[in-house]
Image (cartoon, rainbow, N blue to C red):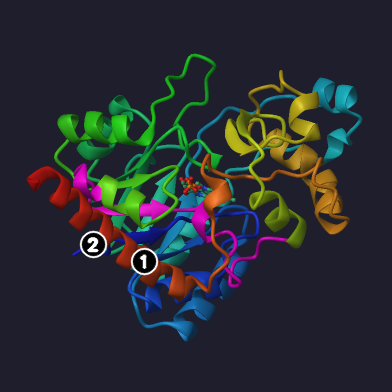
Amino acid sequence: MMRAIVQAPMSGGPSTPALAAAVSNAGGLGFLAAGYRTVAQLSADLAEVRQLTSEPFGVNVFAHRSAPVDVAETAAAWGLDPAAAHWSDDSFADKVALLAEDPPAVVSFTFGLPEPLPLVGTQTWVTVTGVAEARAAGAAGADALVVQGYEAGGHRGAWVDSPQREDVGTLALLALVRAAVDVPLVATGGIADGAGVAAVLAAGASAAMLGTAFLLCPEAGTVASYRSALVTDRPTALTRAFSGRLARGIVNGWMTAHPDAPLAYPEVHYLTAPMRAEARATSDTDRFNLWAGQAHSLARALPAGELVQLLTEEAREALELARHRIDR
Ligand SMILES: Cc1cc2nc3c(=O)[nH]c(=O)nc-3n(C[C@H](O)[C@H](O)[C@H](O)COP(=O)(O)O)c2cc1C
């Protein structure tokens, strides 16, 4: 049985073992983000989350297959050190091997469909952003699909980042994928409250996955200046300026200055990493990524366990109200 409320994996700092454990202890499904962690760090995260909870939790792994790209010209144009840029598969095989030693309840893959699909979790989930990806992931044996709509904060999970992509919102994509595959679906993107959870469950999802909604929890690793930006109504947009891969964040100076950033992931991620680390440390919110979904201004600063309970109550109320409206 799948838990109805899932905390999205959020790499780059926000996801912590404490956040995942608090969500799982409250009856949701917490997630660790293995992205950008070394294998040793992931191993320590796993030990920590297991110390904090005996409930099920998930681990998300990057599965990109992009070809290496030379970003020397971009580095020169942007005034950044080209030596920082490199290609990496984020230690995919070693992370999968580590997870296979002591499988968590769920292992999810984003940015691609590994072939063959490693069945290392009790359940294996794959993120999809379109119907073709959903059909392929279903055929490969995924136990569930994370259906990521256009509203979502952070990177698009698309298997191939391309200017010709189609951007479909969460409810529309959920309906399209549901019509195309017979696999449990986890809807994600722009879900801000319990009414949003109820909406996707009513639309046929087995669970709702929320990312941005958890960024203000005290257990999250979100730095203070990022938290301050989240509670404003500043707009979000899609950008490649921080990582070379399309992602949604609160519009800031670096994004605005580099509207034509190249498709070069993860090289541009590593190229901008020193600048971002310094900007994070000095609270310069124009020079690091403020990943956020379109509904970020509705995020609530509550302990994660309380937030899961509140979302559950709100979802129940929203479903009752909807039933009442249908029947009146
Ligand atoms: C800060 C941040 C980091 C993210 N990192 C990851 C990640 O490592 N792996 C992943 O599959 N998705 C990642 N995502 C996307 C989330 O899994 C999810 O699709 C998204 O948060 C849903 O939209 P919402 O933020 O509007 O709830 C990230 C999102 C955010 C906001």
Give the image location of residue 190, x and y in percent.
45, 43
Please identify the residue farthest to the left as the structure is shown: 327
Q: Residue furthest front?
A: 328
Q: Is residue 213 inside the magenta stretch?
A: yes
Residue at the image position 60 percent from the left and 62 percent from the top:
216
Is residue 289 rendered to the left or right of residue 177? right
Where does the magenta region start and end? 201-223
- Residue at 47% of width from left, 36% of height from top? 151
Residue found farthest to the bottom: 51
Marks 1 and 2, Cα distance to the nearest angstrom? 9 Å
Q: Is residue 104 visible?
A: yes
Residue at x 39% of width, y 79% of height: 25
Q: Eyeballing the image, is 215 above or below 130?
A: below
Residue type at mark 1: give it: Leu
Give the label on residue 2, or none: 2
- Badge 2: how crowded within 10 Å, few (<14), some, or many (20+)? few
- Image coordinates of residue 54 in percent, x first then y, are 37, 83
